[in-house]
Amino acid sequence: MTKVTLTGAENGWWFICFVGRLWLPQGEIPKGTAAEWSLIGKIATPIGEWQGEVVWLIAEKMPADMASPRLVAAEDEGLFRLAGRGVQLAEFYRSHRYCGYCGTAMRHSATEWACLCDHCHERYYPQIAPCIIVGIRRGDHILLAQHRRHIKNPRFTVLAGFVEVGETLEEAVRREVMEESSIKIRNIRYVSSQPWPFPHSLMMGFLADYESGEIEIDPNELVSAAWYHYDDLPKIPPSDTIARRLIEDTVALCRQDDVIFK
């Protein structure tokens, strides 16, 4: 897309991103003119629109207040998605300065999110890693696990993993569940998706029912996993995540069956 050297009069939202971090002065995304935020002379690219104002991307590091885009998620889902777009595009441009085939310096396309090589004519696009995430029900219980990345701040969530080459989404769901918990599942059905810029994933959410097997965790991935009654859950992910939606959807199914069969 077209890059602009800022004169100071440009107005809108400013997504200043570097290596997966976002500039959040006073804990918020800056809004206003380029001059107000001392951005004159910087190179910016329009990447969307929010609340009737242009969203600008500047792919460089600021001296302070660089934070995780995760902090924006609690404000608004749409704003978080734009923040994720900015973070991922900034990292794409940073990591594609030179052609991987011939080593020539590349330029940004003026019409799409792409980097172009004028020497060998290769064209590169931002890569998205598809991931599955699944809520599993067994009667009035849900399977929740503590991942190793949550040891310092214990949190329990549903199982997830990356889709492998040549695999369908449903096959990935079955494989990841088997690898991480050793159980078989059935009745896999799609629910929803969520872009997740950590660093460039697309989370695709599913629900499934327990079929057979006993829980045996993969210790390289998990600290623990167990069946939890829907009325007695441990600490779970925040409401702005697809993991939380899958947990809430599973809990709703458990409650519904509880009422029907009482």
Image: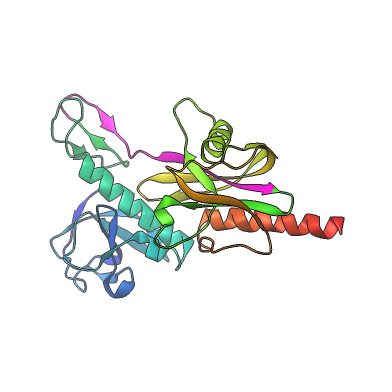
148 inside magenta stretch: no
What is the x, y in percent for residue 130?
45, 39
What residue do we see at 37% from left, 45% from top?
200
What is the x, y in percent for residue 88?
32, 48
What is the x, y in percent for residue 197?
38, 51
| Start-end of magenta stretch | 118-137
The mark tally for this picture is 0
Is 164 or 137 nearer to us in this picture? 137
What residue do we see at 20% from left, 29% from top?
100
Q: Quadrant of residue 187?
A: top right
Q: In this view of the protein, can residue 221 be seen by the observer? A: yes
Image quadrant containing the C terminus: bottom right
125 inside magenta stretch: yes
What residue do we see at 19% from left, 68% from top?
64
What residue do we see at 40% from left, 53% from top?
149
Q: In this view of the protein, can residue 1 be seen by the observer? A: no
| Relative side of 126 to 225, left or right | left
Is 201 or 159 nearer to us in this picture? 159
What is the x, y in percent for residue 168?
54, 30
Q: How is the image coloured?
A: rainbow
